[in-house]
Amino acid sequence: MSTRRAGAAARAGRGGLAAGVLVVALLLAGCGSAPAPRPRAPGTVPEPVPGPASLDDLLAARVVGVARSLLDAPYRNAGADPRGFDCSGLTHYVFAAAGLALPRTAAEQARVGYWVALDELAAGDLVFFAKQRKPNHVGLVVSAPGEPLRMIHASTSRGVVETEVLRDPYWLERLRFGRRVLGGG
């Protein structure tokens, strides 16, 4: 190696070492600069730290995500796959995609889980509709409590769509009840 190259390599090595020392010094200085936490008054409870989502929340997000991916799929009588869905075929399919078994028909699905007040329905719940007493249509709730009730469902005329239930006179007139199939009750 020439003298000129050896000198350049030594200077580069010292520069790299100096930069490394500077980085470590800055990191150490940063550790000491955080403000000390204020002591809590005796008897006060600290703010809760949000924990990880529950398994039910994760499953609901998965079910809703699968349903959203199927928006605009066609309607098919007795259909239960992306080539075409009927209402209960859609709910059966999206729950199965999340690893959860759900009966195949709307009437059977209406007996699973537990009853939930319409204003407490949450994403992942099922909402049922009927002209008479026996449910003949089901949708998947995709809204949170306190939000306008929205569902994804398979409509005979439009395929898989998202509908705001309370703004649609057709569905509002037939709205019957909701069921929660995720979680205990």
Image (cartoon, helix red, strand yellow):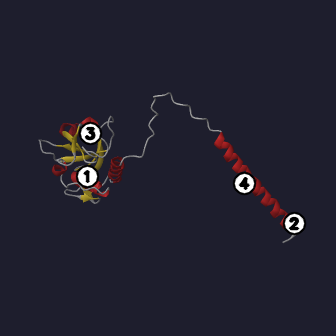
Question: CB of mark 2 within 8 Å of CB of mark 1?
Answer: no
Name the N-terminal-most of marks 2 and 1. Answer: 2
Task: Estimate the spatial distance between the alpha carbons at disc 1 and disc 3, rounded to whole Å.
Answer: 17 Å
Q: Which mark is residue 20?
A: 4
The residue singled out by tag 3 in the image is 165
Q: Nearer the viewer, mark 2 or mark 1?
A: 2
In the rendered structure, find residue 91 and report the number of the disc placed on it.
1
Near mark 4 (Cα within 10 A), the count class, few <14, some 14-19 or many ≥20, is few
Mark 2 and mark 4 in contact? Answer it, CB < 8 Å.
Answer: no
Q: Tell which circle, 1 or 3, labels the residue nearer the N-terminal end.
A: 1
Q: Name the residue tied to disc 2.
A: 4
Question: Can you tell which of label 1 and label 3 is closer to the viewer?
Answer: 1
| CB atoms of marks 1 and 3 within 8 Å | no
Q: Whole-Å distance between the Cαs marked 4 and 3?
A: 62 Å
Which of the pair 68/47 is nearer the observer? 47
Mark earlier in primary sequence (2, 4): 2
The amino acid type found where label 1 is placed reads Thr
Q: Which quarter of the rendering shows the C terminus?
A: top left
Residue type at tag 4: Gly
- Residue drawn at point x = 25 percent, y = 52 percent: 91
- What secondary structure is found at the residue carrying circle 4? helix
Cα separation, mark 2 vs mark 1, equals: 75 Å
Q: CA distance from mark 1 to mark 4?
A: 58 Å
